[in-house]
Structures are given as structure tokens and as C-alpha cells.
């Protein structure tokens, strides 16, 4: 078995995932598999990482994110060549709430991509990790999953599904050596939020959020808000009584 | 539309910012767009990166490395990569950017478009002297690869071409071998301009990096601190931990003002004079003294500040610098970040590149409205009489006449302009 840490990133071309990958290859020599839907984009990230770390092994793998059978075969293929130390599930699409309300198939796609699909990947990896009683599964959720609100509750519902799933998984795996980390970033400066930014929203630098993700995975912290201030903000938002919450335009 | 400022914070006018997450989207996006200009990390001081009411193409999403050959030191990357990220990757591997300006918080594309220079101009020229390839995407969809050995005319137009020849999307750089991150430095106080020139001449041979801080307040007699440095091998030291701080808010008035300047300059001179002479210094504080104070530009208050950097030929250099210092003294305005440096005997490859043989003086002035711009107009006359020029990366106000007389290759440059690209600066200096 190789000594290098084996890391697999699902949705590796997302800005958050790319920055996490950079931090990993900077700090250690790793054996990393980047999984995504677009070969060209994957190769771009892989080349970036290879340039940063001559000694790490970076490979890419194409996968569909929607069908359970494809997700299963991707998990099988990645784990087939050896045990995984870290699986980071890091993709998402910031749903256009308005489109979701007006087109049920868009709504369905968003719910599946942001909610069901990451959960299936996590379930697949957990099973493999349990068989050797070792490994970390990290999923990027969102603060939007903490309470539904009118401006993005379809996205929020999918991320809420991830939150509840991870909660259950943490309960189930509490007595094992398999760790589960849920990261809930606030609005972060990535291409996914370009539209928010062009409207003038204040966004956290993706480098900082990635550093928090990598640290949380290192420590096996169950739930991490990134930046940390969102823990407090979301606690307040979760506890606002409906008669106040319903008056707020968020 | 969101308000965007350049580093000088003189204006905050609305722009439509368009980001790219990858190269394949660039061509379609810029050809379908209204006129725009590339915006990297926003460190140009003046209006070269602004296009009020129009489009800015944010290049930070083009932030991927493409390849790094650790044997030859050739690194290729997308244009939105920051110099900081290159330095932090390559220095531990024994390589370094051969030329770097006073901040590493700029993009590779910006470094090329402004043909930036550093403290080692006399030895290694400017940034573009180490660029081996540029990939440009034009707004008509054409892709142009140019470099010192291919399409040299396009290369000469693009280097220092303030982003007007097409969107720079990729570049290949030749890095320089270094023994490590350390520099052996020496600080020499000087009491007047002629001692500065003497020191600069003596240091041209034997010292890779030379620069000086000059006290530009009335009555200082042109005193300053001359700093020089060479890369040095040192395995005994550990890299210093840097602490980042930030200007938390914009003060209601400039913190750099008549009262504070005298104290600042006095303190800076005497503190450094006392601890002068030889030191081993990490490259980061030596090259980038202000990078750890984030948003230091806010220090100048809500009205922002002007940077004024000129270069004048060496034969009239001492007189011209002297004249400028006198003019600044008379005006009662002043500059804390005043930098005086001699350039080596080489011109920028770029048609609109700034560096040319002579001596360069960089100054910052809090924006006090007409009082400041009138002073800058008077400095312009001195520069113009001395057959010098002003650095476009810092300029926000020079006249079209001064630009045309001091950048004689501008007409040649026009042939390479991309008609889909326009900035506040191009409209001011090139008429469109």
C-alpha cells in the first residue's frame, strides 16, 4: 500500500474544491483523484495541481452525478485501487429560485444535484470506509440549509437534506473510526456566486474558506461554519420567531 | 452595476463586472460584449483599469497554473494568477520571479499589461523581459500567441499596452535561480541628491537590487535612505511569520497630511539611520513592505490619492528631480512613500512601456482637489522639459499632449489596438 495520503474530490472543478486541493498538495505529497463531469475542466485543475506539486500523483475521472448506478460505479472504481483517506464531496449549483418556482424539472434537477447526489456519494464512500474502519467523508453543505427562506428555499431544502443526512450519519458512525465532516460555507467569492457579487454582495474569500475546510477535515470536526461568524448568524436566524422572520426580506 | 475603484480610490463609479471561470468561455463572452477592459487585482492606481458605465472583465477566475518545469524554471499560467502565488510556490524550489514590483498582489496579466519593473531594473530590465509567450484573445475571436521570438510586433504592443490589444489570458515566464528566500541588504543614509547619485552609480555593479526612500519635504535637503541587496544563501534562518493587518475603515481625512508627514518622515529617517548598515532580510519584507497592511490605500481618506511616477533622462536627472522636490516643498504638500531609483541603460520592449534609461521618482499625494492637480501639472512641465515621461500604471490625469510627446510610439501602437476594448485611460489619452 502506498504511503501517500489518498484523497478523492467529487466535483473537483468547483472553486472551493480546487483551493482545498491546492492546500493539500502544498502541505504534503498526496495521491489525489479528481472526479467531475467535464474532462477539459478536470484536466485544467489537474495541471494546476501537478505544477504545484511535482511529487503528488493527480488523476482525473469522469462521472455522472445523477444516476445512482453511475455514482456506485465511480465509488467502486476509486476505491478499487486502494483505500481512501479523505473523500470530499464539493459540488453544487446555486439554484435560480425563480426558475425553480416556474419549471418543475429545473426544480427537480436542482434538488437532485444539490441534495440527493452528494448524499449517494457519501453513502457509497462510508460503506467502503466502514469495511476497513477508517477514513473521512466531508461534504460541503451550506448555511442556506439551516432555515428555508423565500429567496432560495429550493437550494436551501437540498442543503437541508444534506444537513439532516450528515447528522444521521454522524450518529450512526459515532462509535467507529470513520469520521464525517459537514462544512457550511456562507456566501463565498466563487464563480458560482458571480451573480451575487455583481449585485454588490459581500463575499468571503474562497482561499480563507478552503483553509477552514482543510483544517476541519484534518481535525474531523463534525460541523463547521465558514467563516465562523455564520454559526452565530444562523443560530439567530434559526431562532427568529416566524412573525419576525416573515417580515424580513432575505 | 457596482461601484469600482482603482487603487488610488479617486473615483468609485458603477461598472458591469463580468467574471470568467474558465478559458473556453472568454472568447464568446468578450465578443458579445460592449467595449470593456481587463481588471485583475485592481492595483493600478489611476484609470487604466477602469471603464465607468461599461464592462470590466475580471480575470481573477483565470487563476490556474498550467505547468512548471522545475529544471528549466519555465512556468506557464493563466493571466489571473497572482505574483504572490507564484513566489510562494517557486521560492522554496530555488526559483524566483526575476522582476517584481513593490507589491506581489497583482496578476500576471496586469504585470505584463503595465510592463512593471522592480529594484533590479539596471540588471534585469522589466517584467516582460522574462515573458517568453503571451496568449491574447481579441474581441473579434482571434487568438494571438506572441513572444520575443514570435509575432514580436504583437508582443511589443501588448507588453505595457495597458490591456488594449486584447485580453491576456495566458503567459509563460522564465524564472530566475536563487539560493533561497534571503537577501543580504545594506541601508546607507544620504544627505543630498548628489550623494544619492554617487551611491546609485557605485551600487550598479555588485548589487542586484537598489532603491531609495527620499524625504521630499521642504528643508530636508534631499536626504534619504539608500537600500541595496543581493540574494544570499542562508540555511540557518527560518522564514519569518508574517502578521497581516488591515486598515479597518476609511478615516474622514487623510492620515497622510501636512502635520503627520513631518513626523513620519523625521521618524522614518532617524530610525533607519540608526539601525542602518547590513542585515539579512527575507525577500517578502524587502520587496513588498506594504503587502501586510491590507487596504493601506484607505489611509488617504475618502478622497483617495494620486501616485505620480516619472522617469527623466540621466543627464538632466539631478536637476529635474531637484526642481520637482522644490516644487513639492513650495506647495506644502508632500509624500511619504517617495521612492527614487536609477533605471539601467535599457528601454522597455513595449511600445508604451514605461522604463527607459534615467532616474525615476515615485510620489504619492493625498487628493486635495485642485491644489493637488495644479501641483501635478507643474511637475508635468518639469518632466516634459526634461524629456521624461509618466508611468501609465499610476496615472489618472496627465494631458493627452504630454502623453503623445513622451510616448512617441503611440501611433505605431494604435494599429494593434482591439476596437472592442476601451478604458477611462484610453479615452483620455488615445481619444477612444
Image: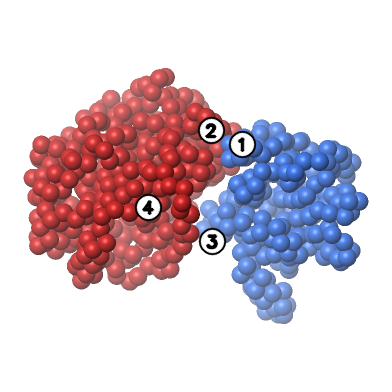
Chain colours: A blue, B red
The picture places residue A202, in percent across and down from the top left corner, at 54, 61
Asked if the residue under mark 2 is in contact with the one under mark 1, i.e. CB atoms within 8 Å, the reply is yes
The picture places residue A98, in percent across and down from the top left corner, at 69, 55
Relative to A29, is B292 on the left or the right?
left
Mark whose residue sits in front, 2 or 3: 2
Q: Quadrant of residue B62?
A: top right
State the CA–CA distance, disc 4 to disc 1.
28 Å
Residue designated by label 2: B70
Letter of the chain that mark 2 sits on in the rendering: B
Q: Is residue A173 above or below residue B312?
A: below
Relative to B171, is A16 on the left or the right?
right
**In the image shown, does A200 or A10 lie closer to the viewer?**
A10
State the CA–CA distance, disc 2 to disc 3.
38 Å
State the CA–CA distance, disc 4 to disc 3.
37 Å
Q: Residue at x 45, y 27 (%)?
A: B133
Q: Residues within 10 Å of mark 3 (few under 14, many from 20)?
A: few
State the CA–CA distance, disc 1 to disc 3.
36 Å
Mark whose residue sits in front, 4 or 3: 4
Letter of the chain that mark 1 sits on in the rendering: A
Residue designated by label 4: B281
Mark whose residue sits in front, 4 or 1: 4
Relative to B273, is A209 on the left or the right?
right
Instruction: For residue A126, say whether it is visible.
Output: no
Mark whose residue sits in front, 4 or 2: 4
State the CA–CA distance, disc 1 to disc 2.
8 Å
Q: Residues within 10 Å of mark 1 (few under 14, many from 20)?
A: some
Letter of the chain that mark 3 sits on in the rendering: A
Residue designated by label 3: A202
Residue designated by label 1: A54
Amino acid at each position: 500500500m502506498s504511503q501517500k495520503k489518498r484523497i478523492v474530490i467529487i466535483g473537483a472543478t468547483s472553486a472551493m474544491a480546487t483551493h482545498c486541493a491546492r492546500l493539500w498538495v502544498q502541505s504534503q505529497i498526496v495521491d489525489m483523484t479528481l472526479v467531475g463531469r467535464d474532462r477539459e475542466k478536470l484536466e485544467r485543475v489537474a495541471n494546476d495541481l501537478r505544477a504545484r506539486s511535482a511529487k503528488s500523483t493527480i488523476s482525473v475521472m469522469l462521472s455522472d452525478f445523477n444516476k445512482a448506478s453511475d455514482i456506485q460505479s465511480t465509488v467502486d472504481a476509486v476505491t478499487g485501487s486502494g483505500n481512501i483517506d479523505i473523500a470530499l464531496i464539493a459540488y453544487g449549483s446555486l439554484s435560480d429560485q425563480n426558475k425553480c418556482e416556474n419549471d418543475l424539472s429545473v426544480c427537480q434537477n436542482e434538488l437532485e444535484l444539490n441534495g440527493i447526489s452528494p448524499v449517494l456519494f457519501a453513502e457509497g464512500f462510508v460503506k467502503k470506509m466502514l469495511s476497513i474502519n477508517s477514513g473521512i467523508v466531508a461534504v460541503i453543505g451550506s448555511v442556506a440549509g439551516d432555515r428555508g427562506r423565500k429567496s432560495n428555499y429550493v437550494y436551501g431544502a437540498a442543503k437541508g437534506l444534506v444537513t439532516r443526512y450528515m447528522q444521521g450519519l454522524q450518529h450512526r458512525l459515532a462509535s467507529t473510526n470513520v469520521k464525517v465532516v459537514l462544512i457550511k460555507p456562507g456566501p463565498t467569492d466563487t464563480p458560482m456566486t458571480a451573480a451575487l457579487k455583481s449585485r454588490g454582495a459581500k463575499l468571503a474569500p474562497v482561499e480563507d474558506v478552503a483553509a477552514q475546510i482543510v483544517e476541519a477535515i484534518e481535525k474531523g470536526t463534525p460541523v463547521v461554519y465558514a467563516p465562523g461568524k455564520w454559526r452565530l448568524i444562523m443560530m439567530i436566524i434559526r431562532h427568529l420567531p416566524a412573525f419576525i422572520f416573515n417580515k424580513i426580506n432575505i | 452595476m457596482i461601484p469600482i475603484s482603482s487603487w488610488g480610490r479617486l473615483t468609485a463609479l458603477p461598472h458591469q463586472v463580468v467574471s470568467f471561470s474558465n478559458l473556453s468561455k472568454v472568447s464568446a463572452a468578450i465578443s458579445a460584449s460592449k467595449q470593456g477592459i481587463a481588471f485583475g487585482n485592481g492595483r493600478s492606481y489611476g484609470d487604466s483599469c477602469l471603464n465607468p458605465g461599461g464592462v470590466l472583465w475580471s480575470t481573477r477566475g483565470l487563476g490556474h497554473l498550467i505547468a512548471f518545469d522545475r529544471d528549466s524554471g519555465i512556468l506557464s499560467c493563466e493571466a489571473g494568477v497572482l505574483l504572490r502565488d507564484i513566489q510562494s510556490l517557486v521560492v522554496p524550489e530555488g526559483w524566483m520571479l526575476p522582476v517584481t514590483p513593490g507589491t506581489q498582489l497583482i496578476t500576471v496579466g496586469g504585470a505584463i499589461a503595465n510592463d512593471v519593473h522592480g529594484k533590479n531594473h539596471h540588471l534585469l530590465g522589466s517584467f516582460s523581459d522574462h515573458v517568453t509567450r503571451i496568449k491574447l484573445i481579441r474581441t473579434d475571436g482571434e487568438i494571438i500567441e506572441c513572444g520575443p521570438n514570435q509575432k514580436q510586433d504583437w508582443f511589443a504592443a501588448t507588453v505595457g499596452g495597458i490591456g488594449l490589444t486584447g485580453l491576456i489570458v495566458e503567459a509563460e515566464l522564465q524564472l530566475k535561480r536563487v539560493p533561497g528566500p534571503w537577501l543580504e541588504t545594506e541601508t546607507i543614509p544620504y544627505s543630498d541628491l548628489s550623494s544619492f547619485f554617487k551611491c546609485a552609480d557605485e551600487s550598479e555593479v555588485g548589487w542586484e537590487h537598489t532603491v531609495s526612500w527620499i524625504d521630499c519635504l521642504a528643508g530636508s535637503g534631499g536626504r534619504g535612505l539608500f537600500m541595496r541587496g543581493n540574494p544570499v544563501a542562508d540555511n540557518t534562518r527560518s522564514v519569518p511569520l508574517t502578521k497581516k493587518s488591515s486598515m479597518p475603515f476609511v478615516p474622514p481625512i487623510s492620515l497622510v497630511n501636512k502635520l503627520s508627514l513631518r513626523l513620519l518622515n523625521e521618524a522614518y529617517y532617524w530610525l533607519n539611520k540608526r539601525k542602518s548598515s547590513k542585515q539579512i532580510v527575507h525577500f517578502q519584507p524587502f520587496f513588498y513592505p506594504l503587502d501586510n497592511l491590507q487596504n493601506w490605500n484607505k489611509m488617504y481618506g475618502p478622497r483617495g490619492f494620486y501616485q505620480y511616477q516619472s522617469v527623466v533622462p540621466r543627464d538632466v536627472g539631478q536637476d529635474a528631480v531637484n526642481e520637482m522636490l522644490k516644487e513639492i516643498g513650495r506647495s506644502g504638500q508632500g509624500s511619504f512613500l517617495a521612492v527614487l531609483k536609477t533605471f539601467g541603460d535599457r528601454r522597455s520592449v513595449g511600445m508604451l512601456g514605461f522604463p527607459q534609461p534615467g532616474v525615476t521618482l515615485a510620489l504619492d499625494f493625498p487628493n486635495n482637489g485642485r491644489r493637488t492637480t495644479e501641483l501635478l501639472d507643474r511637475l508635468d512641465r518639469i518632466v516634459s522639459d526634461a524629456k521624461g515621461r509618466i508611468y501609465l500604471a499610476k496615472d489618472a490625469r496627465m494631458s493627452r499632449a504630454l502623453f503623445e510627446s513622451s510616448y512617441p510610439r503611440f501611433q505605431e501602437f494604435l494599429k494593434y489596438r482591439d476596437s472592442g476594448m476601451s478604458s477611462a485611460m484610453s479615452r483620455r489619452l488615445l481619444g477612444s
